[in-house]
Amino acid sequence: MKKLISVALLAGVLAGNTMAQTMEMNKKTAREAYEALIKYDSDKFLSYLADDAIDYAQGPKPVLGKAAIAANLNDFFRAFPGYTLTVEGIAADGNKVYVQNTFKGTQKAMLAGMIPATGKTVIWSDVDILEFDQNGKLRAHWANNSNAVLDQLGYHAFNNPNTQIVLAAYEQFGKGNVAGILAQCTPDVVFDVTDRVFLPNGMVYKGATEVPNFFRTLAEKVTFTKFDPYRFLADGDDVAVYINGEYKDNKTGKLLKANILHQFKVMNGKITWFKGNTDMPKEITMATK
């Protein structure tokens, strides 16, 4: 019996030592990964990630896979050239490592393809949570203060899940995929198009059977050459989007530009209502370009 107890105690000690060693190795890896970011070496940083890593801190939806994380990371650092990153502390518990850090940078370029350079300086203090797999690779990342950057830039609406639904619909619009747009809507969605520019008499389209008629009519009348949503406002179920639009009048061949306002109501992850308004368009000439 004593021998069995001794063996059990020894196994417990060895397991404890192994876990302690793993935690130290994970801390070392985390430290090296952040040192790579401090030195602007994103390739080295990415070498510490598992291929199927997930980042839960880059937006309302998780970013899946090393390739997608790399694209988002490089986009972020291009927007904040010359940033500084300071690590204040590192701790480990089980297979997780906690990194207290502060990022400081000035946005000098487009961010996420949607947020123009603001020239604003952000100071982002956070505690990152890193989860490691059994091979010592970083497989998941969370942040406690992930909204800080967009809040300080004045673009908090991008953190609203409803904004992401609207963005997904715009992505499908850019592809000319009406079915993809409808996939973001409820079956009884209402498109209130009282827009006198595109539809002189206005029209309300109800449901998945009528809404495609709006896009068909729109395509007959105009061909967009620029559709640039540049400002999002989101509160509750409502999302408003300001858009710079340029298009060709298919009847006259004239190139026109206009400011467009879209309003959406999004409930339970689906668009239930849409309304579009367009300012009086101006012809694009050499003088107005």
Image (spheres, rainbow, N blue to C red):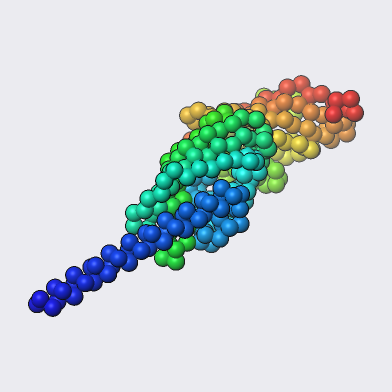
Relative to 11, is 279 on the left or the right?
Answer: right
Which residue extends farthest right? 286
User: In the depicted view, which residue is nearer to us: 44 or 235?
Assistant: 44
Which quadrant: the N terminus?
bottom left
Expressed as whole percent of the image width and height from the top left, the position of residue 267 reads 48, 35
* Total count of labels: 0
Relative to 14, is 61 on the left or the right?
Answer: right
Expressed as whole percent of the image width and height from the top left, the position of residue 246 reads 78, 32
Above or below, comparing residue 56 to residue 125 in the picture: below
Task: Give the residue displayed 85% in from the left and 31% down from the top.
Answer: 255
Task: Give the residue displayed 61% in from the left and 53% down from the top.
Answer: 41
User: In the depicted view, which residue is nearer to us: 74 or 13?
Assistant: 13
Residue 44 seen in the figure: yes
Residue 163 seen in the figure: no
User: In the depicted view, which residue is nearer to us: 92 or 204?
Assistant: 92
Which quadrant: the C terminus?
top right
Above or below, comparing residue 246 to residue 76 in the picture: above
Task: Give the residue displayed 72% in from the left and 40% down from the top.
Answer: 216
Expressed as whole percent of the image width and height from the top left, the position of residue 40 reads 61, 49
User: In the depicted view, which residue is nearer to us: 11 or 232?
Assistant: 11
Relative to 282, is 5 on the left or the right?
Answer: left
Expressed as whole percent of the image width and height from the top left, the position of residue 199 reads 73, 28
Which residue extends farthest left? 1
Task: Give the residue displayed 47% in from the left and 42% down from the top.
Answer: 101
Quarter of image, res 173: top right
Quarter of image, res 110: top right
Which residue extends farthest top? 280
Above or below, comparing residue 271 to residue 16 in the picture: above
